[in-house]
Image (cartoon, rainbow, N blue to C red):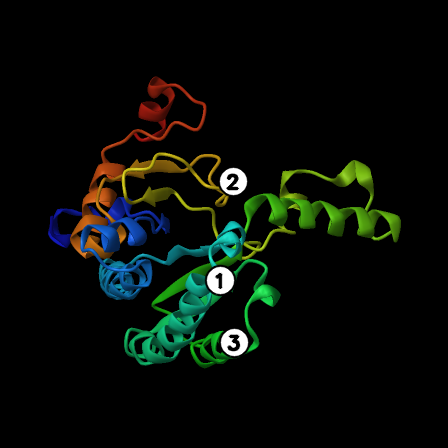
Amino acid sequence: MTSAEINKDTLPKHVAIIMDGNGRWAKKQSKIRIFGHKVGVKAVRDTVEGAAQIGLSYLTLYAFSSENWKRPKKEIDALMELLVNTIIDETKTLMENNIRLQAIGNLEDLPKKCLQNLNNTIEKTSKNSQMTLVLALSYSSKKEVAQAVKDIVKKVQNGKLNSNDINEETIQNHLFTQNIPDPELLIRTSGEQRISNFLLWQIAYSELYFTNILWPDFRRDNLFEAIVNYQKRERRFGKTSEQIEKENV
């Protein structure tokens, strides 16, 4: 699949990806799990560059969930070290491709060195405008919504917000993604067909695309294939096909 097959007029503004399968890929190679994560960095680089190439505005990658902290300490330590090194190494690529980096999640849970490097790259790339790359780190959608509710309750208690004025927009404005548009397309690799506590509020109307490809083997052509598949779907948002046809006339 090539970028030439993509209709630039109906390109999704935001694509989110659950990068899954690093461990299973490593096992197939008779390697330890961290080897799969290291090779997965190549998939990240090619996918990010491909997304920028076709003109995506936002790409969000589910890099590390809150639940991932339950993994063996040895693997977590190796993952954090890999994350630190990757952020440093890929800063040049982000600058060359005019890509801005952002991050969502409970970032204070990250090791100090990791968070410092993350913030440095976020600051360094803050003026870039070609595309925004969002990393979901120590992220839990349920915790995100719970924190939003706490923040809203506090504002009501302090008299800064009337409870009768609380609506969907209020909640949206208190999420980690408050300044990021909801994804139109969510991709998950490795053949698993679940959401895994990722952007539960934001993907209410997202198109879902599941592929059996393990993340280390995923490349920009696979991203293009998912987008072409997305563009063939009819997005109705509760309306009928006839209503959509009339609106498009």
> Is the Cβ of the residue at disc 3 closer than 8 Å to that at disc 2?
no
Considering only order in the chain, which callout, 2 or 3, is on the residue closer to the N terminus? 3
Which residue does the image show at 45% across and 23% down from the upper left? 238
Which residue does the image show at 57% across and 76% down from the upper left? 112
Quarter of the image where one finds residue 91: bottom left
Query: Residue 224 location, x and y as percent?
Result: 20, 49
Disc 3 is placed on an element classified as: helix
Which residue does the image show at 24% across and 55% down from the upper left? 26
Quarter of the image where one finds residue 127: bottom left
Whether residue 203 is visible, yes or no, is yes
Disc 1 is placed on an element classified as: helix
Mark 1 surroundings within 10 Å by alpha-carbon count, few (fewer than 14), some (14 through 19), many (20 or more) = few
In the picture provided, is 15 more to the left or to the right than 117?
left
Q: Amino acid at mark 2?
A: Leu
Considering only order in the chain, which callout, 3 or 1, is on the residue closer to the N terminus? 1
- Residue designated by label 2: 200
Query: Residue 171 location, x and y as percent?
Result: 65, 44
Q: Amino acid at mark 1?
A: Lys
- Residue designated by label 1: 73
